[in-house]
Amino acid sequence: MTDPILKISNLTKRFGGNTAVSDINLEIQPQETVAIIGPNGAGKTTFYNMVSGRMTPTEGKIELEGQDITGLPPHKISRMGVSRSFQINNIFPEMTVQENVEVAVTAFHGHSRKLFNFASRNKAVQEEARELLAKLQILELADRRAEVISYGDKRLLEIAVVLATRPHLVLLDEPTAGMTPDETKRTTSLIRQLADTGEYTFLITEHDMDVVFGLADRILVMHRGENLFVGTPDEVKAHPEVRRAYLGEEEEEEASA
Amino acid sequence: MKQNILLGVLLVAIALLIALPWYAPFFYIFIFTEILILGLFAVSFNLIFGYTGMLSFGHAAYFGMGAYTTAMLLLHQDWPFVYTLFAAMALSGLLALVIGFLCVRLSEVYFAMLTLAFGMMVFTIAHSWRDVTNGSDGIAGFRIKEFGLGLDLTIGNPAVYYHVTLVVVGIAALILYIISRSSFGMILKAIRQNPERVSFCGLNIRSYRLASFTIGGIFAGLAGALIAPFLRVASPELMHWSMSAEPVLMSILGGTGYFLGPFVGAAMFVLLETWITSFTESWMLFLGIVLALMVMFFRKGVLGTFLDWWMNKND
């Protein structure tokens, strides 16, 4: 077994007397795709916020490729190779689709400190941005304003922005949330392709079980902030407590929706 | 095609500005000197507001700092004029760096309030520190003995001073334009639209906000350095909070989304003030009505609204 890319030890986050994430331990190997599932309020997003630097853990340790990143600010964690998407679309609405990705490429290469170049003449940055748009199959939208493209395309655009900083570890927070079934299928197969290239390690939260079982090598089941179970998709499907705590609820939710 | 027409209009406007002393009434030389200086002040403000998304209510502090620097260096040290411009930029930039360092960690209304508070403090210092600033009378009685750069210009001639202002403002505007179109400028625009996404792209947004704030301060200082010889005085009013409101109003009038918007706003502001005050005292009432209409119906300002309409026409 190789060294883990991400090692989480005893990670805990309390808000006042409320424990949102409680004593989570997790190791992720390079090139692995790990999914976190759990009902709303299970602590998935809080977990993400700690790994990406948006929140400081109350207790515990986060190590990225052997380096302690616990409590570092987001821009430092991003520089060290972690990139994330958000549940709610988080893009630059007034820029074109291509410019959205150019911002991230510019930031990654350190061009952002250049005051006296013309950004619109930086062919290398533009080429790199277009390659990423092509990877996400939204190249034909390159010149559209980001706010006018469809919801599903915005989510793909955000993944392109996330990948533009060449992360080793990619955190996707419900990448298919709010998508139509067709969009979900397309997005799942795109993430599958990206994972198969071996360039990225993915950590994904997701409500859609088909997406989770289609993508994940391993699954962490969270319930009320705690680690309920970690295992392969088949193990998760067979686990009685998981079925009761989560999968059952999900079916009820869907039935009532 | 439309781009070329715009470029043509811009070139004609620049030619008209250069030739102004030869066709316009003497009075308008003063008016347009003021427009250029306040236009630079407003554009320097808009780098912070329109591009980076920070509403600074204390921008007059740097404008005033530039004016005092030039006035004092001319009065006490007999520096050549051009050198005082660089000194004004350096000191205003330094002041903006210090104040900005304390302000950029806050966002939205808290940032605005803190910049206003610092602006009032700087005003009070200029107003009360009589030994250095000469209190409410300000620094007056200075003279430009030498222009600098080996040029022999009679700065006392309003037409000459107008041309000096035009060249200095033109160079400054060009530098600010290049910055606004640079990779750095692109990051500033991204920060305005979504600061969180920028920090998750690996950039410390505070550093970029501070850099933008400081550059804005440097060029506000340059505008201030130009206004002191024009008014023949550097007084605390130049630092008053109502002076900080002027670039805000000019930017909104002209439009924050286009680089030249604040210049158009400054021209409207000064010309309307001149024309309206010639037949009524209550020019602020009229300005208030115009501003209210702009904010309610034409958010993009005069230049922004016109250009957006014209660029989308027949598309």
Image: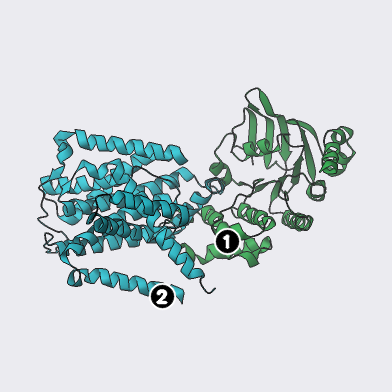
Chain colours: A green, B cyan
Expressed as whole percent of the image width and height from the top left, the position of residue A241 reads 86, 32
- Secondary structure of the residue carrying numbered label 1: loop
Q: Residue B284 at what x, y percent from top left?
A: 30, 49
Q: Is residue A125 left or right of residue A62?
A: left
Residue A136: x %, y % from top left: 68, 60
| Residue B25, placed above or below residue A185 | below
Residue at mark 2: chain: B
Asked which secondary structure carries label 2, the reply is helix
Q: Which chain does the numbered disc 1 sit on?
A: A
Task: Give B117 or A59, whichever is nearer the viewer.
Answer: B117
Residues at discs 2 and 1 in contact (Cβ within 8 Å): no
- Is residue A40 or residue A196 the one in the foreground? A40
Answer few, some or many: residues within 10 Å of disc 2's Cα (few below 14, many 20 plus, some between 14 and 19).
Answer: few
> Looking at the rendering, in which quadrant would you find the C terminus of chain B?
bottom right
Measure how far apart labels 2 and 1 are at the Cα level. 24 Å
Residue A154 sits above or below residue B151 on the image: above
What amino acid is at disc 1? Answer: Arg
Q: Amino acid at mark 2?
A: Ile
Residue at image position (31%, 56%) is B269
Q: Which residue is mark 1?
A: A145
Identify the disc placed on residue B5. 2
Question: Residue extending furthest front?
Answer: B279
The reply to whether residue A138 is in sight is yes
Which residue is drawn at the image coordinates 48% and 45% (left, top)? B205
Position of B22 compared to A24: left or right?
left
* Residue at the spot 22% in from the left edge and 51% down from the top edge: B225
Using the image, determine if residue B144 lies above or below residue A75. Answer: below
